[in-house]
Amino acid sequence: MDIVRRVHSMKETSRQVRAKGRRIGLVPTMGALHEGHLSLIRRMKEMADFVVVSVFVNPSQFGPGEDFEAYPRDLPRDADLCASLAVDVLFAPEEGDLYAEGACTWVEVEGLSSRLEGASRPGHFRGVATIVLKLLNAVQPHVAAFGQKDAQQAILLQRMARDLLLDVEIVVLPIVRGEDGVALSSRNVRLSAEERRAAAAIPRALRAAEAAIETGEREPAKVIEAARAVLEAESLLRVDYVDLVDTETLQPAASMEGERLLSVAVFAGRTRLIDNTVITV
């Protein structure tokens, strides 16, 4: 496995790979790799001939007072994990290569950026869309994989790729969960034992909403309340939002007809966790 640190080197590698008619797959990450990331890599090994994993903790998607400095970083461990899965390139670019001095161009996906996570974290998705476009331009993949845990991000990036006529397939792969049902996240390592126990209420809340629908509930507000009640019963959790939205527009669901995204964000101590489930009635 090669470790590439410069954008120009990554572009040249991809140019050579494409010239040989090989299919490039990209798994963009912020590092601190866990089984969720590894599942994306394994799937990408099936979908592409040449797999690139990028590791970059992107400063522009963190707001003031968020956990940019505290975000877990362990590039040597990430490299070992990638090598064990026969990744072809670990792309760990320098910040100065991706954000040159004086850079003033940003990507905005209007509408989709302002709901859910966007409402709680203003500017977050401007940073996400911008860095992903930069990574796509550097790696030039045929396909890129993202996880369903970041459902809004995936919806937004698929729209960006479509609207900007990008020649890349954005695939979204299932959430990977721990034995307690908690969605795997790099931030989970910051949870205390008590906070981790409390976090298990998050998947229980999603299941409670699904159970309400299975027993005939069709009122979006009551489906939301079924999930919120479980979260609020756990004293160590602080609810940021519980929302039920249309999976295409991310607008609040007026009914349960069609495909709906139930999305939640909570704080367990100082650690913010997100999760979701897609519901089709």
Image (spheres, rainbow, N blue to C red):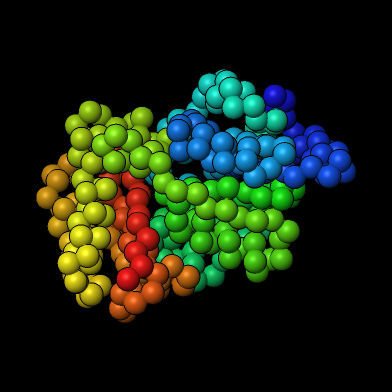
Position of residue 165 in the picture relative to residue 42 (left or right): right
The residue nearer to you, when weighing 240 against 200, is 200
Rendering coords of residue 232 (x, y %): 15, 53
Position of residue 186 in the picture relative to residue 197 (left or right): right
Q: Please report the residue visible at 56 percent of the width from the left and 36 percent of the height from the top.
A: 42
Residue 122 in view here? no
Q: Quadrant of the N terminus?
A: top right
In this rendering, is residue 229 above or below 37?
A: below
Q: Please report the residue visible at 30 percent of the width from the left and 74 percent of the height from the top.
A: 256
Q: Please report the residue visible at 19 percent of the width from the left and 71 percent of the height from the top.
A: 216
In this rendering, is residue 13 above or below 116?
A: above
Q: Please report the residue visible at 63 percent of the width from the left and 48 percent of the height from the top.
A: 144
Position of residue 158 in the picture relative to residue 174 (left or right): right
The residue nearer to you, when weighing 70 against 30, is 30
Rendering coords of residue 82 (x, y %): 59, 27
Residue 33 in view here? yes
Rendering coords of residue 131 (x, y %): 62, 49
In this rendering, is residue 225 above or below 29?
A: below
